[in-house]
Image: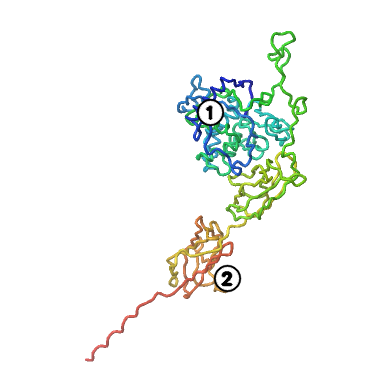
């Protein structure tokens, strides 16, 4: 959703009929997975989000209003080279130059950081069109900053969700209620964790199209979704704004842009007319401009003038007479958070945690509170993330008041860290969960070959020792290991004679440290050599976790065949 620019048209009976026909024709021809019912309403297959998939039913925008205008029925021709002047009347298909560059740059970045997401830049363009009309037709400066803030309506519970202020007005200028901000319309509480620096200026600004586009890309790619599949694409879009009509509108613009678009100058794009809300007083507006001075255009007419005075805008003061007082929301009733049976959180480095965090929101009387947004934040010196690579996730409590955090994926940094649960929009003491990442381990080692390992004195062993490490029957990769030529089965100190390895300088070494199994759990030791001592010797390989394997090495002189004694010569 984006700003209202005084161009929204009320839908009359005729307009409604035309719009229904447009939806039917466009949905049937353009939107993938979209069909049309008997009344001309568009629907999408596999479009319903699951609670675990969407995580937060208020989405990135707080489910704020959005533009409902559909693309023209005639698809644009294939995209000309960027910079080609747009043909007259082609602004609907065109995307302002800086805005287009931001979408493509963000998609390119995601292709490197999250290649499995398969995010098309056209999806960012489709959402940007629906949310803000491509930053109000490309009203941005050369650095991508919007000219004036793009603000949604106050989320005060009157016709919209109720989200009390979470940013002290830092992003949206409102210290009472949150409002969606910027060309991609993030609410402040979502931007706080989803915000990105897309133009490398050291700031994360929701009013910058480069920052906002990159943030939207990461938001759509969380939870490990693959946007090349229709079901994941639908889930990602619905997580942005949980509305079936929103999904259908975005899919229509996505298909439209995929069939071709072109670059147009900044500030020359068309601005949509129609919005999903029907209440002018609640529609979003650009940030206010200074009032006109007497005598300048826009000054209200004097008494007796034939020109009617404009109706003053509705007051932003929630206590203005006539403004309904919103009922307390579920969030307002939360007194504290309680653990909802979370088990011990432990995982090896690189593994997925098998247990998930469960938190319950309760009133002061201990009653569960549903439909409350709980934010989970990973805190501490760790590279562990939630599935999808994010360190923050917001989940809505179910009817039992429970919010289950996304699955944790351990990084390579071992040790303890914290996951903190807090209530979005309410000052309630957070609830901390301790989690631990342990080093990678193996519980079994085995040779990959049963060939006997033999050598002659002063020679070298023909075969190198290779072992495979497993843990609970699964491959144990990147597990630290040590190999030592030990004195005896009961004495694990390094032997001073017999087989040996060589270091980089060719010197004798009988203990190797810093070894590690590969991605298949395999470890191949360097070539072994023998000194002049014969006998049976032992090589012991150990790993983190206690797996041990002892291998026999034999050094023996080569067997020689004895020649028969020469026959005695006959006597003369």
Q: Is residue 494 left or right of residue 297?
A: left
Q: Quick check: 459 above or below 136?
A: below
Q: Nearer the viewer, residue 533 or 208?
A: 208
Instruction: Give the tally of numbered discs.
Output: 2
Ranked by sequence position, the earlier of labels 1 and 2 is 1
Percent x, y of residue 122: 52, 33
Q: Which of 360 and 271 is in front in this view?
A: 360
Q: Give me the C-alpha separation between circle 1 and circle 2.
A: 83 Å
Q: Which of 215 and 336 is in front in this view?
A: 336
Residue in the picture at 47% in, 75% down? 534
Residue 277 visible in image: yes
Q: Residue lying at the far front in this picture: please name it.
A: 38
Percent x, y of residue 77: 45, 26
From the image, tell me which residue sits under label 2.
493
The N terminus: image quadrant: top right
Q: Quick check: 297 above or below 76?
A: above
The C terminus: image quadrant: bottom left
Residue 254's mark? none
Element class at badge 1: loop
Q: Quick check: 57 above or below 324?
A: below
Task: Please tell me in which quadrant of the rendered image residue 298 appears.
Answer: top right
Element class at badge 2: strand
Q: Residue lying at the far bottom in this picture: please name it.
A: 571
From the image, tell me which residue sits under label 1.
39
């Amino acid at each position: 959703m984006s700003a209202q620019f005084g161009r929204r048209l009320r839908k009359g009976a005729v307009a409604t009929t035309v719009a229904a026909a447009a939806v039917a024709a466009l949905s049937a021809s353009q939107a993938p997975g979209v069909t049309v019912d008997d009344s001309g309403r568009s629907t999408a297959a596999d479009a319903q989000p699951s609670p675990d998939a969407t995580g937060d039913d208020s989405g990135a925008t707080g489910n704020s209003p959005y533009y409902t205008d559909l693309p023209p029925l005639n698809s644009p021709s294939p995209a000309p080279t960027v910079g080609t002047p747009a043909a007259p009347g082609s602004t609907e298909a065109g995307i302002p130059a800086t805005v287009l560059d931001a979408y493509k740059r963000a998609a390119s970045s995601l292709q490197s950081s999250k290649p499995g997401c398969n995010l098309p830049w056209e999806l960012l363009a489709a959402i940007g069109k629906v949310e803000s009309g491509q930053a109000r037709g490309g009203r941005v400066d050369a650095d991508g900053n919007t000219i004036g803030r793009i603000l949604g309506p106050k989320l005060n519970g009157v016709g919209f969700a109720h989200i009390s202020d979470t940013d002290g007005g830092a992003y949206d200028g409102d210290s009472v209620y949150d409002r969606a901000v910027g060309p991609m319309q993030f609410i402040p509480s979502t931007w706080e964790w989803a915000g990105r620096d897309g133009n490398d200026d050291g700031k994360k600004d929701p009013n910058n199209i480069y920052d906002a586009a990159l943030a939207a890309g990461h938001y759509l790619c969380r939870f490990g979704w693959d946007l090349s599949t229709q079901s994941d694409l639908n889930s990602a879009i619905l997580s942005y704004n949980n509305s079936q009509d929103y999904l259908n509108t975005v899919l229509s613009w996505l298909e439209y842009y995929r069939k071709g678009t072109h670059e147009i100058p900044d500030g020359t794009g068309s601005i949509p007319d129609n919005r999903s809300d029907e209440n002018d007083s609640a529609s979003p507006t650009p940030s206010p401009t200074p009032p006109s001075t007497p005598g300048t255009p826009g000054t209200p007419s004097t008494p007796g003038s034939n020109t009617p005075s404009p109706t003053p805008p509705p007051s932003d003061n929630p206590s203005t007479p006539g403004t309904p007082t919103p009922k307390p929301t579920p969030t307002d009733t939360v007194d504290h958070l309680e653990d909802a049976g979370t088990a011990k959180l432990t995982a090896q480095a690189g593994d997925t945690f098998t247990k998930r965090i469960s938190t319950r929101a309760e009133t002061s009387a201990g009653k569960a509170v549903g439909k409350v947004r709980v934010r989970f934040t990973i805190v501490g010196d760790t590279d562990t993330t939630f599935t999808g690579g994010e360190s923050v996730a917001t989940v809505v409590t179910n009817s039992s008041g429970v919010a289950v955090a996304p699955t944790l994926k351990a990084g390579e940094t071992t040790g303890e860290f914290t996951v903190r649960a807090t209530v979005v929009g309410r000052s309630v003491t957070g609830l901390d969960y301790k989690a631990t990442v342990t080093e990678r381990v193996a519980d079994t080692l085995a040779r990959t070959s049963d060939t006997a390992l033999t050598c002659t004195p002063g020679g070298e062993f023909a075969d190198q020792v290779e072992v495979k490490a497993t843990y609970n029957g699964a491959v144990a990769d990147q597990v630290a290991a040590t190999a030592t030529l030990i004195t005896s089965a009961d004495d694990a100190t390094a032997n001073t004679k017999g087989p040996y390895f060589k270091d980089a300088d060719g010197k004798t070494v009988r203990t190797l440290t810093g070894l590690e199994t590969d991605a298949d759990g395999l470890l191949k030791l360097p070539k072994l050599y023998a000194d002049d001592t014969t006998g049976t010797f032992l090589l012991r390989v150990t790993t983190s976790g206690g797996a041990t394997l002892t291998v026999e090495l034999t050094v023996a002189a080569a067997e020689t065949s004895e020649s028969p004694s020469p026959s005695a010569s006959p006597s003369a």
